[in-house]
Amino acid sequence: MVNSDLHSALKKYFGFNKFMGLQEGVVESILSGKHTFVIMPTGGGKSLCYQLPALMQEGTAIIVSPLIALMKNQVDAIRGISNEEGVAHVLNSSLNKTEVKRVKEDIVNGVTKLLYVAPESLTKEENVEFLRSVKISFMAVDEAHCISEWGHDFRPEYRNLKNIISRIGDNIPIIGLTATATPKVQEDVIKNLGITGANTFKASFNRPNLYYEVRPKTKNVDADIIRFIKQHSGKSGIVYCLSRKRVEELAQVLQVNGIKAVPYHAGLDPKTRTSHQDKFLMEDVDVVVATIAFGMGIDKPDVRFVIHHDIPKSIESYYQETGRAGRDGGEGICLAFYAYKDIEKLEKFMSGKPVAEQEIGQALLQEVVAFAETSISRRRFILHYFGEEFDNATGEGGDMDDNVRFPKKQHEAQDDAKLLIETIVETNETYKSKDLVNVITGKENALIKSHKTDEHPFFGRGKNHDNKYWMALLRQVLVAGYLKKDIETYGVIKVTDSGRAFIKKPISFMMTEDHIFDGAQEDGSIITAIKGGVVSADEVLMGMLKDLRKVNAKKMGVPPFVIFQDPSLEDMALKYPITLAELANVHGVGDGKAKKYGKDFVELISNYVEENDIIRPDDLVVKSTGSNSAIKLYIIQNIDRKLPLDDIASSKGMSMNDFIKEMEAIVYSGTKLNINYWIDEVLDEDQQEEIHDYFMESKTDNIDAAIKEFDGDYDDEELRLYRIKFISEVAN
């Protein structure tokens, strides 16, 4: 077929004058009857690759797709470009007998060019029989990563496609298409579809207009999200959460704070879902808060930001979800909030699954952790994951992420990199990253013992650094190309040729220090770098507030933290409250505390703002949806009735730990709670006196510091409960 025919067909059916990217090569490959495998990021024009050849050829093309909604969208789109209604059909369980009969007639009469089916429909005997009797131009398997257990969306029914296709006919050309595929998944798909020797087309995964950023997820993540959306008001965005419950809550919080937002998840009835989706497309709302059910087939070109409230379970999912931003080539900010706690949650979800599945899930999660904690270019990291090399200096969008814009400190790590690669060679390339790091730091486990690695002289050679350091170095040496992860035994680290050359003749290796996301950030209200400028607490004001707190604490004869905790001061140095009402909205303050201690602080801030001409952020009063206030009221009322604390907790279905957290929030915002009746049961007089004296003398109310001081005499719960009594009596 001459190319001019191709171009005229493209013009005729789709109205385009030229092909995008690799489309032309793919269409030619399909028209010449070759097996073809296409990897193209979402928005790269994947569907045209099989639609055009199907319209140009004799017979019907079968398109296997897992998503009914997507099929429907595509069928409507194809019907829109043809005069024949029957040019495209869906064959699935939702059709009645008359409709099935119509579909079959259109195929027999040669009207239908594209037949969309779910893999389940192909297992029905009558469908197989029928399809054997008609001319099939080719089979296209969309979302082909579903075949591989290593794909982020594995579907067992996809595994059998090869057998099904061979039942329909012998020499049918097969086209596999996917929007995300690591080298491992590619290999898997080709093997399972039986298309070894297929023409493979792989487009670049680089989306140069997307800006990637990861921030620590604190207790105030809702406020951080509101703040971000308000900085980008009037723009469209998507916020992804893991659970339906969290989607509902966050959508409410956003609405209460004046943001036009709607929830979207699989638990909503279809009518509501469609209405929310349409509102978003029609710009009646700005933000959709969604689980990953949203977005499949949503083609809104001007989504300006995608926020991950929870970190996804694989880099593929992250790539797909962030890929919904900036499809038109304009601004696209991808912001993820990360706390290691979320990873532990995802690990818990996996615990009931078969071992092989758990292993795979674990390996995928480790990649996500590596992405969140890495300090090298995030773009380079993602592209390396998909088997693509990227040079920040020359590649498009090289400076579009937080690590490149705000670089971390670097140090020379040539010797450590050499030690790392040597250890892999000396252990015969048998270990995955975790075990390898254990060998270097000299920690034994069953696997290391079984290989007798702990008996070798190199065992524990890198004790001078901790596991985190070696993990960070390992990731960076991987991306530098000195090591690779083996595909077959996914995750075992092998040395590349350039790694062997490095051992012989080491060259400089600058290691970037990793982000430390530890528990300290749990209650901090520090906001890290935002594109275009850094928002963080005003250091000068922070120093002045600390001094004032110290003076007032001395006057009153109480420790400084009793007046306001550090996170509260940080928040003041960020929001500049100049009235008591504004102060009450600061993190951890509340009305009671503002009235009791706030006067001097608001005066100081007000003078400071005036003297330094500071423009105050006025939008940061985050309103809550009130669901929490009902719980708080319930707790206060039942403590007044002197009910046992464990009974109050269990009546609300809370663990003791969460219940104590709620009480802490109440007393730290200035409300008294009299829990003496309970403490008297738990601690005797002398013990109470001892802890009281400690808190009076102490510079901090940190529980870990208290546990250290008492050297294990009291457990976490006892100290936290006493601290509630202490703050309630001394501070409130």
Image (cartoon, grey):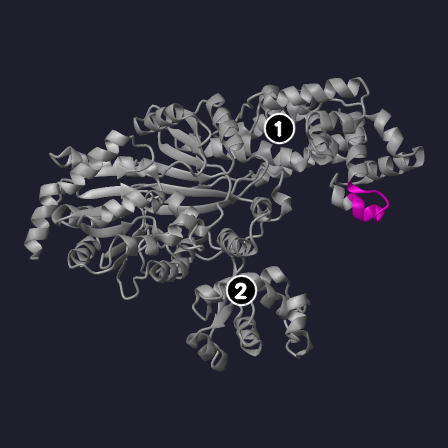
Report the quarter where the N terminus lies: bottom left
Decide which of 365, 224 is in the foreground and name it. Answer: 365
Q: Which mark is residue 340?
A: none
> Around disc 1, counting alpha carbons within 10 Å, would you say few (fewer than 14), some (14 to 19), or many (20 or more)?
some
Tag 2, which secondary structure? helix
Determine if residue 269 is in view: yes
Residue 514 pos. (x, y %): 54, 56
Counting residues from the start of the chain, the first of labels 2 and 1 encountered is 2
Nearer the camera: disc 2 or disc 1: 2
Q: Is residue 671 left or right of residue 55?
A: right
Cβ–Cβ below 8 Å for labels 2 and 1?
A: no
Q: Which residues are magenta?
A: 706-716
- Please report the residue visible at 34 percent of the width from the left and 56 percent of the height from the top: 163
Q: Is residue 535 above or below residue 576?
A: below
Q: Which mark is residue 473?
A: 2
Q: Amino acid at mark 2?
A: Leu
Q: Amino acid at mark 1?
A: Leu
599 in the magenta segment: no
Q: Quadrant of residue 55?
A: top left
Decide which of 56, 21 is in the foreground and name it. Answer: 56
Q: Which mark is residue 604?
A: 1
Farthest-out residue, bottom? 504
Q: How far apart, in angstroms, are the residues tagged by discs 2 and 1?
A: 46 Å
Q: Is residue 514 left or right of residue 102?
A: right
Q: Is residue 269 above or below residue 328?
A: above
Residue 443 pos. (x, y %): 68, 66
- Please report the residue visible at 21 percent of the width from the left and 56 percent of the height from the top: 26
